[in-house]
Amino acid sequence: LGLPPLRQLLARRMAEHGVEVSPDQIMLTDCGTQAIDLLCRFLTEPGDAVLVDDPCYFNFHALLRAHHAKVVGVPFTPSGPDIELFAAALAEHRPRLYITNSGIHNPTGAILSPVTAHRLLKLADQADLTIVEDDIFADFEHNPAPRLAAFDGLQRVVQIGSFSKTLSASVRCGFIAAPPDWMEGLTDLKIATTFGGARLSAELVLTLLKDGSYRKHVEQLRTRLSRAMAETADRLKAMGITPWIDQPAGMFLWCRLPDGIDAAEVARHALSDNVVLAPGDAFSLSHTAGRFMRFNVAQCGDRRIFQILEKAMAECRRKAA
């Protein structure tokens, strides 16, 4: 299961978000992606349907395809998945899993509303659906959002987390919090696929959590991200690029480009100037986000990015004309 003192500390941290869990219900993983991979191995068979948000984190698509799952997208709104279309997808596809971010959603930055969370759990219970709640952005929040795992009590909802986003991509330490009767099977899978864990990263995270360094670091990080969020949003608005929601927490801005501008085309032009952008359809299973783009505000401090972005949009307008 992983380093016991860290699992005990994680259980206390989760309790602060309303998720009551025993340390024996927590298993450490190398990262959030490994956590989802283990859950897919544990819960799905090839051909099973799995619901994802549309848009969602693009690697969910690749990971689920690697497991030969049937990936089904449900349109996402500023308060969570479209509930009517979610219910329709349950009836049509009878999915085994639903994978989502209920805190800070990737790529949109949106937060699940309590009303949507309640209706979502009711539908999941009726359809015998397991929900994987990817909570890796939790520590970026200023005001904690509703957690499906808290409402559900880890009966139908499995929660995963990670420190790779808040500390460093090189610190590979994540976790799964799941029902007690799942832990033996998940442990067997972890042994079969990795035969160990990132003990050094776990010891590092434990030390930083215990001595208060992590709390101070995250407080500073939230302040810096809020400043970067406001500055980036202002620069984008001046170019006619509109954020989908106002001032989300975290590091992502999901934005609508001006009429007639294709995000993929803009990204291709920017790439020729050595700037990598994230066009919307990379996150959309239905490829209906062609006018959207995700910006990482933590990477938008260089003014040249906006100069190149403006140049790329001008080139798209010129070609369209």
Image (spheres, rainbow, N blue to C red):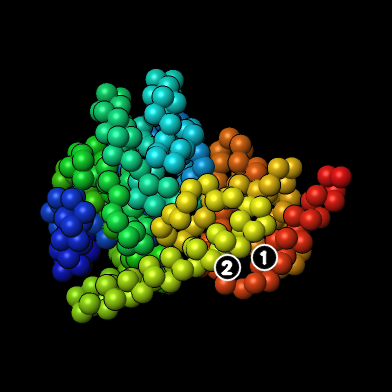
Query: For mark 1, what is the residue?
Result: 306
**Residue 158 placement (x, y as % from top left):** 27, 45
Q: Is residue 210 left or right of residue 287?
A: left
The quarter of the picture where the C terminus appears is top right
Q: Residues within 10 Å of mark 2 (few under 14, many from 20)?
A: some
Residue at x 61%, y 56% (from the top left corner):
237
User: Which amino acid type corresponds to the residue marked 2 in the rendered image?
Assistant: Cys
- Judging depth in this view, the residue of 61 and 152 nearest the camera is 152
Q: Quadrant of the N terminus?
A: bottom left
Point 80% across, 49% down: residue: 317
Residue 127: percent from left, percent from top: 30, 24
Could you tell me which residue is drawn at 27 percent across and 46 percent down?
Answer: 147
Callout 2: helix, strand or loop? loop
Does residue 72 lie above or below 238 as drawn?
Answer: above
Q: Position of residue 55 (x, y in %)?
A: 51, 42
Question: Quadrant location of residue 287?
Answer: top right
In the rendered view, would you say 309 is above or below 304?
Answer: above
Amino acid type, label 1: Phe
Q: Is residue 38 visible?
A: no
Q: Nearer the viewer, residue 183 or 293?
A: 293
Return the residue at label 2.
300
| Distance between the alpha carbons at the discs numbered 2 and 1 | 8 Å
Disc 1 crowd rating (10 Å Cα; few below 14, some 14-19, many 20+) is some
Q: Are marks 2 and 1 in contact (CB under 8 Å)?
A: yes
Q: Is residue 126 left or right of residue 83?
A: left
In this rendering, position of residue 289 left or right of residue 101: right
Determine if residue 27 is in view: yes
Q: Where residue 305 sits: x, y (%)?
A: 66, 67
